[in-house]
Image: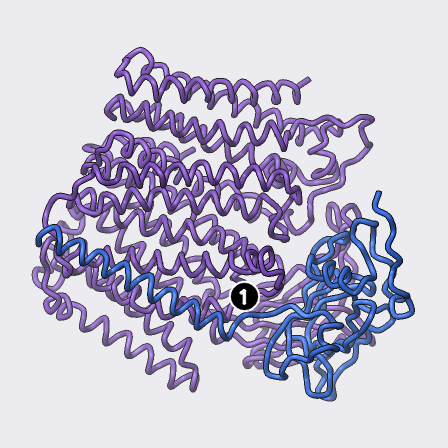
């Protein structure tokens, strides 16, 4: 009964969303206050309906209702409750319902908190959001109904892929989707602006919080995924330039460009068409990511389905929303005249440079991700592009971007002079050079990591210089504290986010110095890596809630001092008939000792030992970036004079 | 700055951005495309020793040995086959959890002058029933297995197997 209710709620949501499209667009066109007034309650209705459907699906998972096909395929009664819950979105159908739920939440937020928006704009934004929801609800109901029944019900489900049974991964999809779908709101604002033919500073002030919130969530989601890959897959790496990873990186890059250009619209009323374009692009990249991951063109742990019908439907949706958006753009963008002066050397000039570089990087990632697929389809030639391609193509673009990250915040709006900015940054540059020299001295001819350390030092020091400059720390140290309190949070947020990027680059550079070793060790024997002795004590059997394991105990000693005891495992999951490796990681924040248990033979065990300097800083840096976004979102300016900041905060809490 | 000049600037910037991105992409493509080769492809035309490529097929039954090099580094040796030909592979690393004899495998590495493929990465997916699409394609091309006709035959029998007779499609 409850699954049928869920199915009905989805259908109801579809009907309500259709009504919302009509009332929103027609009402705004005819300036009919009654029709426009109906969009808000309809959006609330869609939210309630989708939320109920999601709750029904979750209920089926929690009670392990094996009459529901989706539960049978993806769950098992012996699974811990957390993974039963996360199993709701750990599969194709459920994750699409989560996608629509978050979209409905965004719609509800725009309806509930956007009361200060001009009513026509609000109605149009809600209508566009509903239009996106219609497409995806139709997709769910037509091709991937999560509530399909199976008869006779099997006694037991087939279980969730064990490598997905992890707390990190339980929250990876919701965070990622908050990011993806947040860009649906900026998309809706962009399309609404194109229909109205008007973009002004107020529009920028409404779009920026959404872009910022979406970007922050996306940052967290990507970082969580990367961290998960690091500790769960046991390969010792954190980013593989896998198409699925690229699919989430592209909207991140486009969104990063968007939130920077939205600043220019807000402050200078310039770059309007460009910002609208980026809004369309960011959501386009999000949809492309959804297509790549959900259609089964890629084979990985993410691709739950390999159903060409679904892929085709998502491709059609992608073409409709993005093609439609860009057509509208081509037709209406002329209407938006730029105002104000624009000089190349200025804050806005630096932001344009930032946009240009970020978009170029996104383009490189796009080509590297899609070209092998096209070549396979069109030329029949099978090849792949790996990390070397992305590294050689992206590094030359990232270098000027990192340089500009330091300069940009130092330049004044309108017209700036490069030389004073240089003067204020000389010590940051010096620090960067120092880091470069120090790394070369300590580690020998390792230019890549040395460049990384230099870049990180430059970015962090430049962010600190920016703040020090604004609070006049050196010129008037006494007033600095009160000036720091008075400094707008957006300025703090920006500096924190930039510093977070620096921290992340520190981690990346540290990982460039990582060493690893593979060794067959018998119990009692030890092996040495990076000045530490690893002694295998024993390998024993162990059992967990739904798996059995072989667990090795390894003592790590620095000379005679015991550093830590590591216990890597090889787990076998009888339900899924799978074996996974569970890496043991010991971190002291300066480096990770990372140990993987390989196969056992000749009375010993193969150990793979990694010594990863600064590894945790990669994800720490990403978290700091997201924190910077959060600080910026809490800016008074966004709350007081810009009503749309509230929905962004609302979704941040949701 | 007037409108005309601004437009010029914008166009110039876009051209620089797009141009540099294209140039970088093309140069990076030139050196870093990793082609997929089946054992039969290699028998026909061996790639240059310094060029990395991906070799895929089935792990030949009974071919896997795990030993240690004199300095205690574990090394796995196995043969990758597409039914018609097999290529010996050495890999110094921990084999993935789902690496089995008779299962599809994709390896990344370089072909040595002695005809032995030195793998730096071995990919076997986290799913028992999964067949890498390139491998399925290679097997189809060598005429040994049509994915539409069910699971692949056991790899141990492969080198003795005649080309599969073309069965009518159902």
Residue drawn at 83 percent across, 50 percent down: B149
Chain coloured purple: A
- Can I make out residue A82 in this image? no
Direction from residue A110 to residue A510 in the image, left or right: right
Q: Quadrant of the N terminus of chain A?
A: top right
A214 vs B78, nearest the viewer: B78
Q: What number of labels is visible?
A: 1
The residue lying toward the viewer, choosing from A438 and A339, is A339
Chain B shown in which color?
Answer: blue
Query: Which quarter of the rendered picture does the C terminus of chain A lie within?
Result: top left
Residue at 26% from the left image edge and 74% from the top image edge: A431
Given residues A523 and A467, the one toward you in this image is: A467
Task: Tell me which chain the residue with mark 1 is part of.
Answer: A
Whole-percent x, y for residue A138 in the image: 55, 28
Which residue is disc 1 drawn over?
Answer: A385
Residue A8 screen position, x and y as percent: 60, 18
Corner quadrant of residue A510: bottom left
Q: Residue at x 73, y 50 (%)?
A: A544
- The reply to whether residue A311 is in sight is yes
Category of crowding for the residue at label 1, using alpha-carbon neighbours closer than 10 angstroms: few (below 14), some (14–19), many (at least 20):
many
Residue A154 image offset from top left, x and y in percent: 81, 32
Residue at the spot 55% in from the left edge and 59% down from the top edge: A242
């Amino acid at each position: 009964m409850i699954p049928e209710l869920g199915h009905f709620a989805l259908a109801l949501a579809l009907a309500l969303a259709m009504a919302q499209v009509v009332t929103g667009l027609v009402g705004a066109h005819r300036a009919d206050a009654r029709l426009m007034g109906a969009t808000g309650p309809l959006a609330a209705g869609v939210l309630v309906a989708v939320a109920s459907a999601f709750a029904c699906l979750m209920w089926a998972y929690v009670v392990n209702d094996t009459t529901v096909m989706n539960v049978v395929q993806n769950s098992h009664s012996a699974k811990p409750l957390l993974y039963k819950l996360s199993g709701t979105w750990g599969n194709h159908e459920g994750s699409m319902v989560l996608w629509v739920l978050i979209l409905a939440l965004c719609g509800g937020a725009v309806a509930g908190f956007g009361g200060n928006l001009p009513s026509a704009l609000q109605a149009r934004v809600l209508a566009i959001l509903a239009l996106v929801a219609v497409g995806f609800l139709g997709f769910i109901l037509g091709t991937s109904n999560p509530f399909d029944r199976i008869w006779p019900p099997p006694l037991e489900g087939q279980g969730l892929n064990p490598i997905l049974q992890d707390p990190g991964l339980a929250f990876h999809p919701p965070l990622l989707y908050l990011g993806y779908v947040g860009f649906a709101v900026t998309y809706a604002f962009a399309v609404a602006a194109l229909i109205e033919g008007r973009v002004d500073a107020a529009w920028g002030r409404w779009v920026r919080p959404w872009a910022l919130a979406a970007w922050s969530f996306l940052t967290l989601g990507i970082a969580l995924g990367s961290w998960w890959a690091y500790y769960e897959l046991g390969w010792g790496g954190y980013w593989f330039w896998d198409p699925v990873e690229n699919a989430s990186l592209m909207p991140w890059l486009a969104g990063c460009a968007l939130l920077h250009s939205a600043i220019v619209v807000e402050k200078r009323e310039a770059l309007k068409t460009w910002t609208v374009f980026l809004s369309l692009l960011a959501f386009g990249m999000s949809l492309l990511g959804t297509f790549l991951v959900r259609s089964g063109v890629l084979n990985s742990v993410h691709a739950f389905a390999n159903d060409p019908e679904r892929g085709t439907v998502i491709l059609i949706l992608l073409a409709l929303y993005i093609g439609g958006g860009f057509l509208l753009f081509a037709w209406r963008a002329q209407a938006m005249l730029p105002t104000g002066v624009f000089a190349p050397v200025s804050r806005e000039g630096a932001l344009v440079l930032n946009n240009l570089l970020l978009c170029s990087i996104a383009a490189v990632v796009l080509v590297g991700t899609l070209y092998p697929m096209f070549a396979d389809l069109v030329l029949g030639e099978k090849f792949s592009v790996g990390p070397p391609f992305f590294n050689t193509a992206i590094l030359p673009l990232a270098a000027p971007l990192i340089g500009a990250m330091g300069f940009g915040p130092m330049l004044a709006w309108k017209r700036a002079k490069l030389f004073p900015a240089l003067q204020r940054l000389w010590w940051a540059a010096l620090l960067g050079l120092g880091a470069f020299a120090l790394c070369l001295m300590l580690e020998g001819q390792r230019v890549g990591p040395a460049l990384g350390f230099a870049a990180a030092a430059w970015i962090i020091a430049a962010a600190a210089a920016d703040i020090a400059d604004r609070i006049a720390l050196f010129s008037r140290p006494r007033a600095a504290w009160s000036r720091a309190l008075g400094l707008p949070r957006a300025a703090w947020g920006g500096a924190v986010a930039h510093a977070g990027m620096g921290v992340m680059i520190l981690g990346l550079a540290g990982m460039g110095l990582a060493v690893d070793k593979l060794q067959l060790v018998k119990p009692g024997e030890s092996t040495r890596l990076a000045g530490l002795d690893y002694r295998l004590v024993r390998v024993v059997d162990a059992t967990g809630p739904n798996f059995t394991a072989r667990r090795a105990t390894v003592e790590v000693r620095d000379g005679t001092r015991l550093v830590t005891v590591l216990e890597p495992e090889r787990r076998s999951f009888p339900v899924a008939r799978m074996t996974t490796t569970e890496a043991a990681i010991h971190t002291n924040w300066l480096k990770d000792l990372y140990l993987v248990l390989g196969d056992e033979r000749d009375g010993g065990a193969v150990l793979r030992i990694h010594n990863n300097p600064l590894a945790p800083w990669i994800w720490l840096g990403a978290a700091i970036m997201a924190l910077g976004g959060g600080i910026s979102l809490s800016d008074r300016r966004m709350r007081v004079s810009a009503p749309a900041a509230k929905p962004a905060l609302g979704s941040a809490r949701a | 700055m007037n409108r005309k000049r601004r437009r010029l600037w914008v166009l110039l910037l876009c051209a620089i951005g797009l141009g540099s991105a294209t140039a970088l992409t093309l140069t990076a493509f030139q050196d870093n495309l990793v082609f997929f080769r089946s054992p039969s492809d290699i028998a026909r035309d061996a790639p240059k020793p310094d060029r990395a490529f991906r070799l895929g097929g089935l792990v030949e039954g009974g071919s896997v040995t795990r030993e240690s090099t004199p300095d205690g580094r574990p090394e796995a040796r196995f043969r990758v086959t597409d039914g018609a030909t097999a290529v010996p592979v050495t890999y110094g690393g921990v084999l993935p959890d789902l690496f089995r004899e008779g299962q599809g495998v994709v390896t990344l590495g370089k072909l040595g002058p002695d005809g032995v493929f030195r793998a730096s990465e071995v990919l076997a997916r986290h799913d028992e029933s999964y067949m890498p699409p390139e491998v399925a394609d290679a097997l189809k091309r060598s005429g040994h297995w049509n994915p539409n006709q069910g699971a692949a035959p056991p790899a141990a029998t492969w080198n003795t197997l005649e080309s599969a007779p073309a069965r009518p499609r159902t």
